[in-house]
Each structure stands twice: as structure tokens, then as C-alpha cells.
Amino acid sequence: MAEEKTYPMTSDGKAKLEAELETLKTKTRAEVIERIKIARSFGDLSENSEYESAKDEQAFIEGRISTIEHMLQNAEIIDSESVAKDEVSLGRSVTFKELPDEEPETYTIVGQSEADPMTGKISNESPIAVGLLGHKLNEEVTIKIPSGDMKVKIISVD
């Protein structure tokens, strides 16, 4: 039997998922049910775009609820405090610069469910994170990225 996939995440990430799940179950689900009820009252369902739209949204919400529940059941909370302070790990921010002389970049490495590259949070499964995880402050690391290899120096770990 295949082993169940775990979802590494920080305790903050888990709390955000739990809050999203609660909102979906108590508020969003009820709103969509009400929209379906109203759309049904318009009559012929075969040509009722409001009804179809609401049903599509309901399917999306139920899928998201199922996904979040599965992720929470298989969550692996990462405690970055159990790792050496100068080691890159999930839940930590890392600043590095591409060698020889690029500008420093800072990212927080989080679980896939928490990733938001626009705010500097990258998934632990991304090529950059995979290349940095387990390395220490001041190390020079070669990271395999889709366009080739990138050589970086880790300049801080927080």
C-alpha cells in the first residue's frame, strides 16, 4: 500500500488552513447554497446560467474543503527551533546572493500549502528551497534550477 503523503507546514500555516476551512464550511458553503436556491427559483434549469455558475462554485468549494481536510489530517508541523540556528530549514528565512556579485534575495521556506512567492514565501518543494535546505550560513551552494545551475552564498538564516 502506498504511503500517505505528508504536508510539512509551520504552525502558522496550519492555523491559516484551519481558519480557511472554518470559513468555507460555515460561511461560504451557506452563501453558495442560498445562491443555488435563488437561481432555482428562476425556473428552467437547463438554460439557467446563474444556477450553473453556483453549482460550479459549490463543486469548487467542496473540493477545496476536501483538500484542506486531507492536508490537515496529514500535516507535519515543522519546528524550526529543533534545527541548528544557522541551518536552512522549513519555517526559516534565508538570504543568499547569487555568485559572483548579484543582489541578495530573501525567502522564507514554507510548506507547499503556505507558499506565496509574491510575498517571499517559497515552497519547500521548489528548486531553490530544495537546493538550500540543510545547508548552513556562509556556505556556497550549487542549486539546480530549470535553466541550469545557480551558485549562491548563504548570507543569513533567521
Image: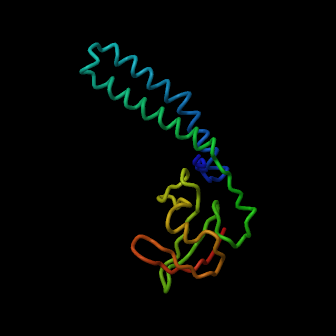
Report the number of discs: 0
From the viewer's perspective, is 16 left or right of 82? left
User: Compared with residue 5, is residue 21 higher up or lower down, i.e. above or below?
Assistant: above
- Identify the residue shown where x is 37% and y is 27%: 54
Q: Name the image quarter holding residue 35.
A: top left
Please give left or right for residue 137 compared with residue 126 in the image. Answer: right
- In this picture the colour scheme is rainbow
Image location of residue 136, percent across then percent down: 66, 76
Q: 152 above or below 39?
A: below
39, 71: nearer the viewer: 71
In the picture as drawn, the residue positioned furthest to the front comes out as 1
Name, please, the residue furthest toward the bottom. 100
User: Which residue shows up at 64% across the image and 81% down it?
Assistant: 138
Classify the position of the C terminus by image quarter. bottom right
Give the percent coordinates (x, y) of residue 31: 46, 25
Residue 23 place in picture, x, y as percent:
55, 33
Residue under the image location 49 percent in, 27 percent down? 29
Residue nearer the viewer, 39 or 136 = 136
Which residue shows up at 60% across the image and 39% down it?
A: 19
Instruction: Point out the residue furthest to the left here.
Output: 47
Residue 149 drawn at (x, y percent):
45, 78
In the rendered image of this protein, does residue 9 appear above or below residue 70?
A: below
